[in-house]
Amino acid sequence: MSVGIDEISFYTSNYYLDLRTLAEAQQTDPDKYYVGIGQEKMGMAAPDEDVVTMAANAAMPLLADGAGEDITTLLFATETGIDQSKAAGVYVHRLLGLPSNCRVVELKQACYSATAAVQMACALVARRPGSKVLVVASDVARYDLNTPGEATQGCGAVAMMISADPRLVEIDPEVGSYTEDVMDFWRPNYRATALVDGKFSTKIYLKSLKKAWENFRSASSLMFSDFGHFCYHLPFGRMAQKAHQHLARLNKCELNSEQLEGQIQDTLLYNRAIGNSYTASMYIGLASLLENCQQNLAGQRIGFFSYGSGCVAEFFSGRVMEGYERGLHREQHRQLLEARQELSYEEYLQLYRYPDPRDGEHHDIPSITTGRFRLAAISHHKREYVVC
Ligand code: CAA
């Protein structure tokens, strides 16, 4: 029996900052961002958006025609959780009207946890093949202003339905994992923005790729040359390009740089316009590949490298299914990205500095998001979500 991704949909805020605008404000050459890190725009969440509203918006298209009734588990992956105790997915469960017998849990290990969720979901479906597991990954990437990380912010959520006989990508059971206790990127509970040792984080990303790949090779008969495309964790596009060249060198691959670029370029398109979405980024990269690649991908193997700072990494593989095009939401994603509104630098700062009330009073949140779900108020330390 094959198990994997049956459907995929993503969401990002309606607002973005062009990195040219950031470069101008910082008196930096825009090519540092457009070329040096390979990013063009970064999504900025409105005050009434967070990981819950983005996740619900991402998942809604997957629930047409009563598809929610077969969901037995909702796994919510995030590293920008909104509560130390309650799983953000419980709010999503209500907003989407999922069955009360559907269990919900939140997973955390930096940007890696969506992959843990996908692997757990595949195992649950293999145990009970008629069931479906909804995996959502949702994050708002925030760094301090005027730090090297600032240009690599972003926000987004992805939702994937994991089922038997999937329409999009069958996930192979073999994985290569790597874990090491390092401090490359972290966010203590009392901080709203991440701390990062930027250069070290890029080095440990590449080291983890090597280690996870070696572990994968000891578990799987697949070799580098068996893969048509690769999806990498995408903190910024240039990181994936460096990672792919690194993996190609490790495997003494003879493809030229243009051919190597062809194996990843379609995965980078959405992320370049959204920015880092932490847990969601690699899977938004998968949607970007499936929806934008001009070749018919059916039957091709895809290599996935998932990385979460701290760090846990995993290399795994999947095979694209015949007729996969029919399960995509290409047009909806095109409209989502095209309808977005550009922010001035001042508007960006206003959103960045929008207060996060912590005093326990009642605070109505202005209605700004164009999404279906919004955070309407924070009252007595409780978040109040509504369907618009
Ligand atoms: N034209 C073209 N290229 C230019 C340029 C210009 N005018 N100016 C600079 N560049 C190039 C540089 O040569 C450099 O290229 P190489 O990496 O190939 O040498 C690139 O642009 C970046 O320039 P800097 O090295 O000077 O950039 P920086 O030090 O200011 O910041 C960063 C880079 C450290 C990655 C920073 O963006 C950062 O800290 N980001 C957050 C951390 C991060 O994303 N780490 C990734 C791994 S960790 C992870 O993946 C988990 C996660 O999601 C966070």
Image (tube, rainbow, N blue to C red):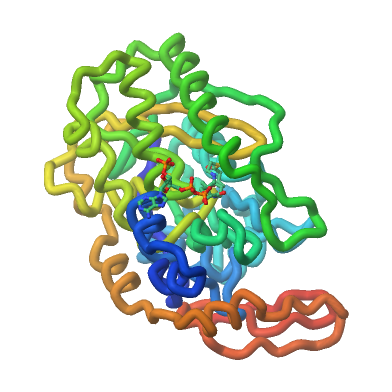
Horizontal side of 26 relative to 238 (left or right) equals right
Q: Is residue 17 visible?
A: no
Residue placed most toward the observer, 378 or 264: 264
In which quarter of the view is residue 222 placed? top left
- Report x, y in % for residue 41: 40, 65
Position of 82 relative to 211 (above/below): below
The structure residue drawn at horizontal position 46% and vertical position 82%, both measured from the top left corner, is 344
Residue 297 relative to residue 145: left or right = left
x and y percent of residue 298 in the render? Answer: 18, 37
**Image quadrant occupied by the N terminus:** top left
Please identify the quarter of the rendering in which residue 109 is found. top right
Where residue 295 appears, as percent x and y from the top left, is 12, 43
| Image spot of residue 277 (x, y percent) | 50, 56
For image coordinates 26% across by 45% down, the residue present is 265
Residue 357 seen in render: yes
Q: Nearer the viewer, residue 270 or 41?
A: 41
Write the residue at 44% across / 36% down: 129
Q: Residue at x 26, y 34 (%)?
A: 229
Depth check: 58 or 177 in front? Answer: 177
